[in-house]
Image (cartoon, rainbow, N blue to C red):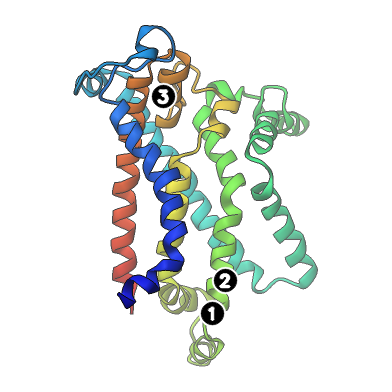
């Protein structure tokens, strides 16, 4: 009885999670086994079709491409881009002067606090054919490619790195502040270089924060939709169609809710796999 009383304060949070998280997820899995549609007879009374949507999905030639693009987008812009750049900025900011610290911190965090739709349009304006990047390249006599047509995934990954690096930077700044100064000072007195102190002392001591940050930015990037849709809408010719974009196109552009939720269910399962892997990594990093 006493145990249940202690759990009462978290009761409202559990209820909210069940209503606004577990409920939609369960509905998505249920809808993926039906022929639900956005319009027509199936919109009013969808029927049960079993694994038919998943069979169609396995035979869909766009699925392998979307899976590969999703892995590329997450790996390039989150695991490598945001994670490493955030760590580098956090390390450099420890030695920066107060004015430089404030300027860099404001510049990095500004992209993160912008509403996602505003950041997406800003990135589109920067990478478009007549955008800021090509104006800068033209000013120094370099070529002016159509980034969103010729290199859509490069533009999207760079935009997502710009948009999300602030989160990793803040996580690592907090983690680095918790590293005892006497430990690094002792290593310095023993003759360890700056790189050696970072690699063999600082990073092992913040490995829990690294694992946590990797888990959060991976799951956030898996769900990125607005940035991609505004900048490329999945094009050209599905060259930037990640799984969230594919799910949206099937469900709301083509009106096939059942098939679209089947794609979304695959994305949920991928997120669960990543989440489980990172939770295990977090357990392994505990002292």
Are discs 3 and 2 less than 8 Å apart at CB?
no
Q: Which numbered tag is attached to residue 174?
A: 2
Report helix, strand or loop for mark 1: loop
Asked if residue 51 is positioned above or below residue 10 in the image, the reply reads above
Asked if residue 149 is positioned above or below residue 111 in the image, the reply reads above
Question: What is the distance, in whole Å, between disc 2 and disc 1 at their CAs?
Answer: 7 Å
From the viewer's side, name the closer residue of 272 and 194: 272
Q: Which residue is mark 3?
A: 246
Residue 71, visible in the rendered structure: no
Which residue lies at the image location 36% right of the left edge and 7% below the top edge?
Answer: 41
Q: Residue furthest front?
A: 1
Q: Which numbered tag is attached to residue 178?
A: 1
Q: Which numbered tag is attached to residue 236?
A: none
Which residue lies at the image location 31% right of the left edge and 63% below the top edge?
Answer: 281
Sequence order check, earlier mark of 3 and 2? 2
User: Crowding at label 1, few (<14), some or many (≥20) Cα neighbours within 10 Å?
Assistant: few
Q: In which quarter of the view is residue 32 placed? A: top left
Sequence order check, earlier mark of 1 and 3? 1
Q: In which quarter of the view is residue 42 placed? A: top left
Q: In which quarter of the view is residue 66 placed? A: top left
Q: Position of residue 173 (x, y in %)?
A: 59, 69
Residue 146, visible in the rendered structure: yes
Q: Position of residue 72 (x, y in %)?
A: 40, 38
Q: Position of residue 183 (x, y in %)?
A: 49, 88
Look at the image and tell me in which quarter the C terminus lies. bottom left
């Amino acid at each position: 009885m006493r145990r249940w009383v202690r759990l009462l304060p978290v009761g409202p949070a559990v209820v909210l999670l069940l209503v606004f998280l577990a409920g939609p997820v369960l509905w998505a899995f249920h809808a993926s086994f039906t022929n639900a549609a956005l319009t027509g007879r199936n919109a009013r009374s969808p029927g049960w079709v079993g694994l038919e949507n998943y069979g169609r999905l396995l035979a869909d030639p766009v699925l392998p491409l979307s899976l590969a693009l999703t892995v590329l987008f997450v790996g390039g812009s989150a695991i490598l881009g945001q994670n490493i750049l955030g760590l580098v900025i956090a390390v450099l900011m420890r030695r920066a002067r107060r004015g430089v610290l404030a300027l860099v911190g404001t510049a990095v965090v500004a992209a993160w606090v912008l509403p996602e739709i505003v950041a997406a349009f800003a990135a589109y304006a920067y990478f478009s054919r007549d955008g800021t990047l090509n104006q800068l390249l033209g000013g120094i006599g370099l070529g002016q490619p159509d980034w969103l047509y010729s290199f859509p995934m490069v533009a999207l990954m760079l935009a997502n790195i710009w948009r999300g690096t602030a989160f990793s930077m803040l996580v690592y700044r907090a983690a680095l502040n918790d590293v005892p100064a006497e430990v690094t000072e002792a290593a310095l007195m023993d003759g360890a270089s700056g790189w050696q102190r970072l690699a063999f002392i600082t990073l092992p001591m913040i490995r829990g924060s690294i694992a946590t940050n990797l888990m959060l930015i991976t799951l956030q990037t898996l769900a990125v939709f607005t940035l991609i849709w505004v900048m490329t809408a999945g094009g050209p010719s599905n060259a930037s169609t990640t799984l969230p974009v594919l799910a949206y196109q099937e469900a709301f552009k083509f009106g096939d809710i059942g098939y679209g939720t089947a794609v979304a269910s695959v994305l949920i399962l991928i997120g669960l796999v990543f989440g489980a892997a990172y939770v295990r990594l977090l357990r392994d990093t505990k002292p």
